[in-house]
């Protein structure tokens, strides 16, 4: 593929991604984060594939940036999901509440 075709696909994917995310209800954003982690994993695999077949320093630099940002996004998604799941766990009783109930 030539550069214009790749740039066109990139720009169109930005528009599609924006439309898809903007149509999701605010209540559903956090639960969808764990599903989105799979997408970030695919971004990492794509970045690694591009880095392995890079023919020039620009391609390699862009691939390393994609890998770095994909990894940050992946880890951040798991952190947010973990914090969300912590909200649904029952709280442990503290020493004060145990003494007051005895």
Image: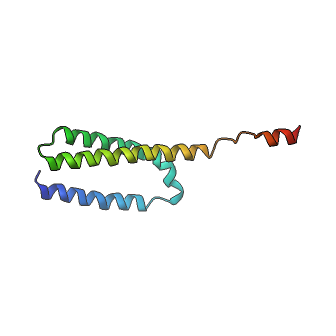
* 67 displayed left or right of 29: left
Residue 18, by quadrant, is bottom left
Residue 52 coordinates in the image, percent (x, y) = 19, 37
Q: Residue furthest right?
A: 102
Q: Assign the C terminus to one quadrant of the image.
A: top right
Instruction: Say which residue appears at 85% left-offset and 39% top-offset.
Output: 99
Residue 49 coordinates in the image, percent (x, y) = 22, 39
* 11 displayed left or right of 98: left
The scheme the figure's colours follow is rainbow
Instruction: Say which residue appears at 63% left-offset and 44% top-offset.
Output: 88
Instruction: Say which residue appears at 20% left-offset and 42% top-offset.
Output: 50
* 63 displayed left or right of 75: left
Residue 82 coordinates in the image, percent (x, y) = 53, 43
Q: Nearer the viewer, residue 101 or 22?
A: 101
Note whether 91 is above or below 1 in the view shown: above
Residue 47, by quadrant, is top left
Residue 14 coordinates in the image, percent (x, y) = 30, 59
The count of marks equals 0
């Amino acid at each position: 593929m030539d550069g214009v075709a790749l740039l066109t696909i990139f720009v169109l994917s930005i528009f599609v991604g924006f439309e898809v995310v903007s149509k999701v209800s605010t209540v559903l954003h956090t639960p969808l984060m764990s599903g989105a982690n799979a997408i970030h994993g695919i971004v990492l695999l794509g970045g690694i594939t591009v880095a392995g077949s890079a023919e020039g320093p620009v391609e390699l630099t862009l691939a390393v940036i994609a890998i770095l940002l994909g990894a940050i996004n992946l880890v951040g998604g798991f952190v947010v999901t973990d914090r969300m799941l912590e909200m649904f766990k029952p709280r442990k009783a503290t020493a004060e509440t145990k003494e007051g109930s005895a």
